Amino acid sequence: MNSLKLPQSIRLTFADNANPGEPLTLDEDATDKLGHVPKLLRALVECYGSRLGEPTLWGGEIVMEVCSDEDLFDVTESIANELALTAKELEVNAMLTPPLALTQAVKNTHCIDLLRALATTYDKSELTASLHVASKTIELPHPKLSAFTEPKKPDDEQRHLRVSTIGVCKPGQDANVLLLGDLTLLELATIDYPHGIDVLVDMVVKGSTTFTGPVRLVSKNVYRALPGGKLHTQLAL
């Protein structure tokens, strides 16, 4: 295929042996890769927008000129080096226990989404992007998707409560139910809190009972006690 003469460019090749200006038959592999081109183009523009020219279809490639007033090799090598460094930092972070948040694990945070797009498109279609400078070609990295491992986010529905109880409600299928001081409900799974309903009535009605422990919000105004909580009762004098 005749090459588009640009001093520096990024190229996405979706079909081999395609000549510009001639009909291009898209086989299954080329069609699959072509379908992932827009996502990768958007990621490239978001990362290096001011440095890239408009995408140009040239045979079986999408070509974007790298535009800069800087020295030719400085800008292109900068792109290649920071992507390679960030890919390595992501891989190292994924092996940590626990891993850091991605924005804390890498120096060039603007590269994360582009590398994720490179990884995703390669995983789904083996579409790659390459940087071309004169006669030099550098394939941009496409880390494994596992490299984007982050620490588990805290469960927003789980919390620790210390709350007073003011009543006992009709039991559920697998749990007794207490009415809390803020008029929310607390389910006590019988497998974790094997108190009989009569015992709970005595604790709540005849004394001052507080529940302390981990709970999960299961629906609006309804908590379910997790294992490890305790009911503390102070009998009325």
Image: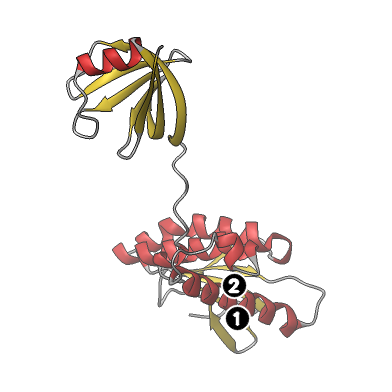
Depth check: 158 or 111 in front? Answer: 158
Residue contact between numbered discs 2 and 1, judged by CB atoms under 8 Å: yes
Q: Say which element carries label 2.
A: strand
* Picture quadrant where residue 176 is located: top left
Read off the residue under disc 1.
132
Depth check: 177 or 199 in front? Answer: 199
- Say if residue 90 shows up in the picture: yes
Depth check: 12 or 44 in front? Answer: 44
On screen, residue 66 versus residue 125, left or right, reads right
**Residue pushed farthest right?**
69
On screen, residue 36 versus residue 101, left or right, reads left
Within 10 Å of disc 2 (Cα), the crowding (few <14, some 14-19, many 20+) is many
On screen, residue 191 versus residue 135, left or right, reads left
User: In the image, what residue occupies the spot 28% across and 13% down?
Assistant: 202
User: In the image, what residue occupies the spot 41% across and 56% down?
Assistant: 35
Expressed as whole percent of the image width and height from the top left, the position of residue 100 reads 53, 63
Expressed as whole percent of the image width and height from the top left, the position of residue 187 reads 30, 23
Residue 10's disc number:
2
Within 10 Å of disc 1 (Cα), the crowding (few <14, some 14-19, many 20+) is many
All told, the count of numbered labels is 2
Above or below residue 53? Residue 156 is: above
Expressed as whole percent of the image width and height from the top left, the position of residue 28 reads 29, 62
* Picture quadrant where residue 70 is located: bottom right
Residue type at mark 1 is His
